[in-house]
Amino acid sequence: MVAGTEGADMNDTNAGDTNVDHYAPRDYLVRHVTRYDSELPREAAYERGRLLPREAPSQRILSAVTRVDPEPDVVAVHADLYGNPSSYLEIRTEHTRLHIEKEFRVHVAWPRPDVEALDRWTVDEAAAWNAAHGDPAETTEFLLPSPLVALHTDVRAYAARHLPGDRPLGAALLGLVHGIYTDFTYRNGVTTVRTTLPELLELRAGVCQDFAHLAIGCLRAAGLPARYVSGYIETQPPPGKPKLQGSDASHAWASVRTPLGTWVDLDPTNDHFADSRYVVTAWGREFGDVSPLRGIVYGEDSPSTLTVGVDVIRLDGDGNPIELPVPRPEPEPGDAPLDVRGGS
């Protein structure tokens, strides 16, 4: 019996660019392909994941379809505790390859956070406001520690450094995002989906899900409800280079409840607030609540390969791709891997 989990990932996104155009409404076609190849046949597979995107204040789903090969014997979709569509698949056909593809069109329109309005409260005043006026059904779980966001002493110390209680809230949120961005090195392969915050603080390196978890831990330590958001981000290739098929990836960031009665989304991986380049799939307390795909397969124990490809394609007013990604060329012997700022 073999179990597997697909992690979060991302590519670079012009970090620090505050061009107002990033808040203009946009339409996207998002395609996410996950493929498992095994050397020996699997007798059955039981999978659960976020195969459909959710509606959110920042976006409206225009269409969505999921394709699975082999065809599942059982498919069920329900809303989880946080309102995310959760899909369950049973595949009882013997197979050496499992191919899952989700494709959807989405209209995205993020509001620009009003930092000046947020600065009417200090961090401590915002925490007090949430305690007095927040809806417990909406905020309580996002204030409590969770398995990957335990509020250890070193997490509280880091939070106190970047979220002092007397600092204006808007400035403090920007300071937290920038602090994580500058204090940590983006590096694939040094963390896993089970890395704890004390381990991250010691490593001083990680990927988007790690930085999202740290931001959430700091916000909760300051008394501010915070949740983990998974989704996608539109990325751009280096100047003069074409965008390659499958070169986009999943992403993760944090979201905080404010006294304005709204949630503000923060991306410490890229040092800015979320904008119309960001597409939401799901949210929860931490990564474990919104894992893209996890499950169990039955069969002889044998090596397997996971392949993931993601495309986030901007559409014009008629719903046509503005620019299609080009097929990725076959690597030549001795080629170095593509160096991107991404996470896993």
Image (cartoon, rainbow, N blue to C red):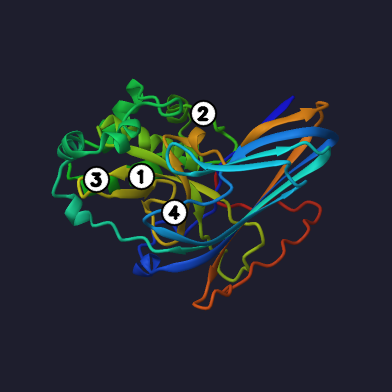
> In this view of the protein, can residue 27 be seen by the observer?
yes
State which tag comes first along the sequence, 1 or 4. Answer: 4
Residue at numbered disc 3: 258
Query: Where is the C terminus found, in terms of image quarters?
Result: top right
State which tag comes first along the sequence, 3 or 4. Answer: 4
Which residue is found at the position 36% from the left and 36% from the top? 216
Residue at numbered disc 4: 55
Using the rendered view, name the quadrant where residue 257 is placed.
top left
Using the rendered view, name the quadrant where residue 44 is placed.
top right
| Residue closer to the observer: 337 or 319 | 319
Identified by mark 2, the residue type is Thr
State which tag comes first along the sequence, 2 or 3. Answer: 2
Q: Mark 2 or mark 3: which is in front?
A: 3
Cα separation, mark 3 vs mark 4, equals: 20 Å
Which residue is found at the position 16% from the left and 42% from the top? 122
Which residue is found at the position 49% from the left and 68% from the top? 27
- Mark 1: few, some, or many residues within 10 Å (few <14, many ≥20)? many
Cα separation, mark 2 vs mark 4, equals: 29 Å
Identified by mark 3, the residue type is Thr
Using the rendered view, name the quadrant where residue 126 is placed.
top left
Identified by mark 1, the residue type is Ser
Residue at numbered disc 1: 255
Residue at numbered disc 2: 195
Determine the residue located farthest toward the right in the rendered image. Answer: 40
Q: Position of residue 337 (x, y in %)?
A: 68, 50
Image marks 3 and 1: residues in contact by CB distance under 8 Å = no
Say which mark, if any, is on residue 202. none
